[in-house]
Image (spheres, rainbow, N blue to C red):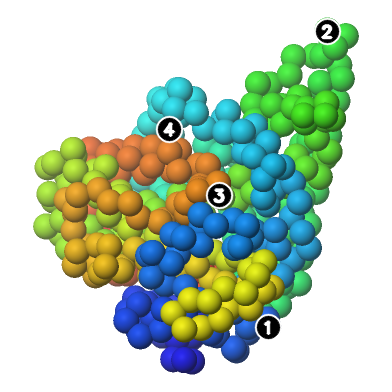
């Protein structure tokens, strides 16, 4: 039962063979070499059911491998429902559609800089990373020209979730919190001045959070706003970057795939969904059981951490035909890359839009791209993407 180690260097380099072992032999896998130990679920039906059963598989103690203090307002209904409804206003189809022109403009600005630079460049650093950081920064009303700093802070916050020693990332996480708290305080002062007609307050998501009131009429605390803002800044950053780099990595690995995408841009949306299935940016997240669960002959005890491996579920042959093949024109299926149920990723449609614009711009502006090498994997074990992707135009 200990033949799958999510932290092993070989697994980190290529986790797919390990998922196959879990899917075929150990649908409930106990991993003991972590504090605390945790269970892994890999089959599509089991992961799907766990994501839907929020009363048994709870997010209250965090979605990482460690038990954290109760998340309260952001974990489970009804508080989670309130926050989700509030934030969802920034991600409605109408708002997402309105963002399209701005995202197109950003993608072309980045392509301009690439065309003016060296023929060999890093698709991650020069294109896939800046695009989503600029977009989410503008949504929150924080200066997009700080994007390198935001990227560093975001990387630290994500890395801390699964690091052997999370305190190693305490300093950058504190810097991000201090920065956002200052932004929140500045916006609160503007809102105070607005009542006397002395200030115009920017109409962005931070302002919407500060204007919001709970059902009992209370305004959100600075800590509540900070929690939402930091999650959006992090969630709207690394995962979309990885979606773009993963897709481009796979199509450039087989030049005929890239050429076909250039010639048939109508395939871009299918290619995005296949990338999300085949290479989900988030390999999986954790839940904590609220009762004993009996599954496949194994009892998962109450209070256990359970790793729901989306990536393995997306390779389950019981759900997907030829799941280990990357098919550019695979018919769209119900993959789990964005989770499911009440915790389905709020930014899914924005991520899809950014990826669609990013890839289309590359097809139009940099159609002769070739892959230099496979680059380098990002560090956190539960994420999947390239921290480097060298290419030549």
Q: Which residue is mark 4?
A: 103
Q: CA distance from mark 2 to mark 4?
A: 33 Å
What's the CA distance linking mark 4 and mark 1? 42 Å
Separation of marks 3 and 2 at Cα, in angstroms: 39 Å
Can residue 177 be seen here?
Answer: yes
- In three-dimensional space, the C-alpha distance between marks 1 and 2, rounded to whole angstroms, equals 55 Å
Helix, strand or loop status at disc 3 = helix
Mark nearer the viewer, 1 or 2: 1
The residue that disc 1 covers is: 35
Q: Earlier in the sequence, mark 2 or mark 4?
A: 4
Using a 10 Å C-alpha cutoff, classify the residue at mark 4 as few (fewer than 14 neighbours), some (14 to 19) or many (20 or more): many
Compared with residue 40, is residue 59 higher up or lower down, i.e. above or below? Answer: above
- Residue denoted by label 2: 197
Whether label 3 touches label 2, CB < 8 Å: no
Q: Position of residue 137 (x, y in %)?
A: 60, 38
Q: CA distance from mark 1 to mark 3?
A: 25 Å
How packed is label 1: few (under 14 Cα within 10 Å), some, or many (20 or more)?
A: few
- Residue identifier under label 3: 343
Front position in the image: 33 or 374: 33
In the image: residue 179, left or right of residue 103: right
Mark 3, Cα crowd under 10 Å, few <14 / some 14-19 / many 20+, is: some
Q: Is residue 152 visible?
A: no
């Amino acid at each position: 039962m200990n033949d799958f180690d999510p932290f092993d260097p070989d697994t980190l380099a290529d986790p797919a063979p390990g998922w196959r072992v879990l899917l075929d032999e150990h649908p409930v896998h106990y991993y003991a070499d972590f504090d605390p130990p945790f269970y892994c679920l890999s089959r599509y039906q089991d992961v799907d059911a766990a994501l839907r059963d929020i009363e048994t598989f709870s997010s209250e103690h965090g979605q990482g491998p460690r038990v954290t203090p109760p998340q309260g307002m952001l974990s489970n209904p009804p508080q989670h429902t309130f926050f989700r409804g509030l934030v969802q206003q920034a991600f409605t189809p109408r708002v997402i559609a309105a963002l399209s022109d701005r995202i197109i403009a950003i993608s072309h600005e980045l392509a301009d800089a690439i065309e003016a630079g060296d023929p060999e460049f890093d698709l991650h650093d020069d294109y896939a990373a800046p695009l989503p950081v600029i977009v989410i920064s503008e949504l929150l009303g924080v200066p997009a020209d700080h994007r390198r700093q935001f990227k560093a802070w975001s990387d630290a916050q994500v890395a801390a979730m699964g690091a052997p020693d999370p305190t190693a990332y305490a300093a950058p996480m504190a810097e991000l919190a201090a920065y956002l708290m200052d932004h929140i305080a500045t916006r609160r002062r503007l809102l105070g001045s607005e009542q006397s007609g002395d200030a115009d307050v920017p109409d962005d998501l931070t302002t919407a959070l500060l204007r919001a009131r709970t059902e009992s009429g209370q305004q959100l605390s600075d800590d509540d706003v900070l929690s939402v803002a930091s999650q959006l800044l992090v969630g709207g950053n690394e995962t979309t970057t990885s979606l773009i780099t993963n897709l481009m990595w796979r199509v450039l690995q087989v030049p005929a795939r890239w050429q076909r995408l250039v010639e048939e841009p109508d395939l871009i949306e299918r290619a995005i969904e296949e990338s999300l299935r085949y290479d989900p940016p988030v390999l999986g997240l954790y839940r904590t059981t609220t009762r004993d669960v009996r599954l496949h002959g194994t009892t998962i005890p109450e209070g256990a951490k359970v790793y729901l491996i989306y990536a393995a579920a997306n390779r389950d042959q019981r759900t997907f035909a030829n799941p280990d093949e990357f098919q550019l024109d695979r018919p769209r299926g119900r993959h789990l890359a964005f989770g499911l149920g009440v915790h389905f990723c709020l930014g899914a449609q924005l991520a899809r839009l950014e990826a669609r614009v990013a890839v289309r711009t590359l097809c139009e502006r940099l159609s002769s791209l070739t892959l230099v090498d496979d680059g380098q994997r990002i560090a956190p074990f539960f994420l999947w993407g390239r921290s480097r992707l060298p290419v030549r135009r």
